Image (cartoon, rainbow, N blue to C red):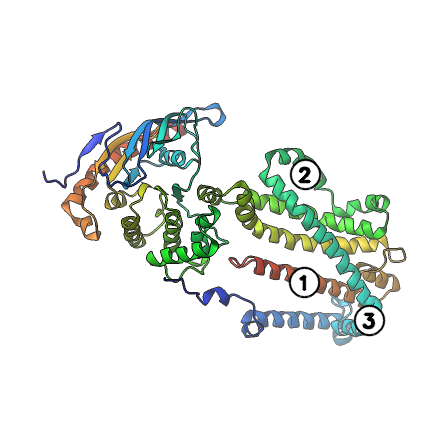
């Protein structure tokens, strides 16, 4: 019996370290970052080197000073604790938003009555910025930690729901018809057609939601403060450095958040890639 | 006139040209479909009757938007009809008490833009029907799918995703995905519309080859007259909306057919005949469109 032979092409798009190092895209990125750093260094040191201060960026400590400050804090447990606390909060809010948001969005998409009942209040609540919830949640949730997690959850929730809803509503109706005419049940349509068909939108929502979660968690940490029960976090690290007047540490905190956010979106990209081998996202 | 000349029948339920036995005879009787968007009655199909024999390749041509697809949707069970009846092998699909036919694996549609599931490999797409119907185990279904793909000349594409292959290959695979369900009727809605002439000719030969193996009844909507005569046992020319049968052109060119017949006198004669009928309707449709705009 003739069996379709496996073709090499299905594996060619998989990630590999060697492929990364051989890729001009990777090196272009490295060069771009190096040039940006050199530019920053020169601008920061413009007063010493050229006798005049470049506006704005001239006031920022140079990368070498930031790296020195960084080297100072990486040995401190408190710095890593800030990472740990922020990532924990982001993941808690983000995962809760996925767990609630994906089924909610799918239910909105497939059931007209559910949509009629829940979509209007959802649309009224959606424009309220997550940070506007901070005072209310500080009052209503028993601990500051829960308040921060709740606000983080809200940050991702709306984006996830809107993406899932949009994705599920725009599935090509011909997929549904083809599946139905081949004998698919409603249950099957949902799990085997609507869900995989919505997967790209789920991951788009996750990528955008993850970005918002970081924005929200940092602001929430600054507002809720460090001395109380919910202390620390990278947001508080920055705020604390500002209070202490350490410009270098502020920049260290900012870049740390950049790296943390990048790691999180890379994880989502990787998951998306693994879950949807039929398409390349982002 | 020789035995190979065309005969025409005007209107009504003309008798089908071919009887090959087997299953898949469609009987459309006095079907009317009225859409009612926003209270404006749009008559898409008006008292249309057509008998299609089992194992026939019946080509449906007519102006854009004339209601051809409405008819196909009624047979497939995607849409209801307003009056009339449609039978498949004597069994009622839809009629007065049951305006919408149930969807079923005995009538499978191959769509204009292709509807292979992009998240499944081609092999899994083809194996899909028998698995969800519970007719075959996953392994059996995949074996059969691989076998049928190979028969259709698609040896190497089983592991690829639909997005990785050409539209021609995808469309062939989609027809294989339909045929693995052993349908009585294949409903094709302009499947080769956006293809260039060369690819089309390859698709036609592949379709005829698959048809020769299965002798499934084919209900084929197209705008391409050459295609309709090359493939069809009969070419049914529809009127502009509301659709009914304007003229039926019998194509008695023997099978198997190859591309040499395109230049034969007989082919050209049939082409002219169909062209005349279609052109008349196209002009009506065009003028009607202008009136609607004015």
* Position of residue B171 measured from the top left corner of the image (x, y, whole percent): 38, 51
* Position of residue A201 measured from the top left corner of the image (x, y, whole percent): 58, 50
Q: CA distance from mark 2 to mark 3?
A: 44 Å
Q: Quadrant of residue B146?
A: bottom left
* Position of residue A124 measured from the top left corner of the image (x, y, whole percent): 70, 37
Which residue is painted at 40% across and 37% down in the image?
A: B76
Q: Which is more N-terminal, label 3 or label 2?
A: 3
Labelled disc at residue A123:
2
Classify 10 Å Cα crowding around label 2: few (below 14), some (14-19), many (20 and above).
few
Vertical order, B17 against B49 (above or below):
below
**Viewer-closest of B115 and A262:** B115
Direction from residue A122 to residue B32 in the image, left or right: left
Which residue is painted at 60% across and 37% down in the image?
A: A111
Q: Which is more N-terminal, label 1 or label 2?
A: 2
Pointer 3 and pointer 1 on the same chain:
yes
Quarter of the figure with the C terminus of chain A: bottom right
Q: CA distance from mark 2 to mark 1?
A: 30 Å
Vertical order, B33 against B206 (above or below):
above
Chain of the residue under label 2:
A
**Viewer-closest of B87 and B116:** B87
- What SS does tag 2 mark? helix
Classify 10 Å Cα crowding around label 3: few (below 14), some (14-19), many (20 and above).
some
The residue singled out by tag 3 in the image is: A73
Labelled disc at residue A262:
1
Which residue is painted at 74% across and 45% down in the image?
A: A129
Classify 10 Å Cα crowding around label 1: few (below 14), some (14-19), many (20 and above).
some
Quarter of the figure with the N terminus of chain A: bottom left
């Amino acid at each position: 019996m003739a069996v379709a032979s496996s073709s090499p092409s299905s594996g060619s798009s998989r990630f590999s370290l060697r492929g990364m190092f051989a890729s001009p895209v990777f090196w272009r990125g490295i060069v771009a970052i190096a040039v940006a750093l050199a530019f920053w260094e020169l601008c920061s040191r413009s007063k010493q080197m050229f006798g005049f201060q470049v506006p704005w960026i001239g006031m920022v400590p140079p990368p070498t000073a930031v790296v020195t400050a960084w080297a100072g804090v990486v040995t401190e447990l408190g710095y890593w604790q800030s990472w740990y606390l922020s990532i924990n909060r982001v993941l808690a809010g983000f995962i809760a938003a996925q767990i609630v948001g994906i089924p909610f969005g799918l239910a909105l998409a497939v059931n007209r009555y559910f949509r009629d009942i829940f979509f209007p209040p959802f649309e009224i609540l959606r424009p309220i910025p997550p940070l506007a919830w901070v005072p209310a949640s500080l009052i209503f949730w028993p601990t500051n930690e829960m308040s921060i997690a709740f606000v983080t959850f809200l940050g991702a929730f709306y984006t996830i729901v809107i993406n899932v809803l949009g994705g599920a509503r725009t599935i090509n109706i011909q997929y549904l018809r083809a599946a139905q005419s081949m004998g698919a049940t409603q249950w099957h349509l949902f799990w085997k057609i609507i869900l995989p068909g919505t997967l790209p939108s789920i991951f788009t929502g996750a990528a955008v939601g993850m970005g918002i979660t970081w924005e929200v968690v940092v602001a929430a940490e600054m507002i809720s403060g460090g001395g109380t029960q919910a202390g620390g976090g990278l947001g508080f690290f920055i705020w604390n450095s500002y209070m202490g007047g350490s410009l270098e540490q502020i920049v260290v905190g900012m870049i740390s958040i950049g790296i943390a956010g990048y790691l999180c979106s890379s994880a989502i990209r990787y998951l998306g890639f693994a879950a949807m081998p039929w398409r390349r996202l982002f | 006139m020789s035995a190979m000349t065309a005969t025409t029948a005007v209107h009504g339920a003309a008798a089908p040209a071919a009887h090959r036995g087997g299953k898949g005879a469609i009987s459309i009787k006095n079907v009317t479909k009225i859409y009612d968007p926003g209270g404006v009655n749009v008559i898409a199909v008006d008292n249309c009757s057509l008998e299609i024999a089992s194992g026939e390749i019946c080509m449906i041509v007519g102006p854009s938007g004339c209601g051809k697809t409405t008819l196909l949707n009624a047979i497939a069970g995607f849409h209801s009809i307003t009056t009339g009846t449609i039978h498949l092998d004597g069994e009622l699909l839809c009629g007065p008490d049951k305006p919408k036919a149930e969807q079923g694996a005995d009538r499978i549609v191959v769509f204009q833009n292709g509807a292979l599931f992009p998240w499944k490999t081609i092999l899994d797409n083809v194996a899909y029907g028998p698995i969800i119907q519970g007719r075959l185990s996953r392994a059996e279904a995949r074996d059969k799918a691989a076998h049928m793909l190979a028969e259709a000349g698609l040896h190497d594409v089983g592991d690829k995703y639909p997005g990785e292959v050409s539209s021609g290959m995808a469309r062939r695979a989609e027809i294989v995905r339909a045929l693995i369900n052993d349908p009585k009727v294949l409903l094709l809605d302009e499947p080769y519309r956006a293809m260039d002439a060369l690819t089309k000719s390859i698709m036609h030969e592949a379709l005829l080859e698959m048809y020769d193996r299965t002798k499934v009844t084919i209900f084929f909507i197209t705008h391409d007259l050459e295609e309709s005569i090359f493939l069809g046992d009969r070419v049914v020319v529809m009127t502009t909306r509301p659709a009914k049968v304007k003229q039926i052109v019998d194509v008695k060119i023997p099978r198997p057919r190859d591309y040499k017949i395109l230049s034969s006198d007989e082919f050209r004669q049939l082409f002219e005949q169909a062209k005349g009928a279609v052109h008349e309707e196209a002009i009506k449709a065009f003028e009607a469109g202008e009136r609607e705009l004015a």
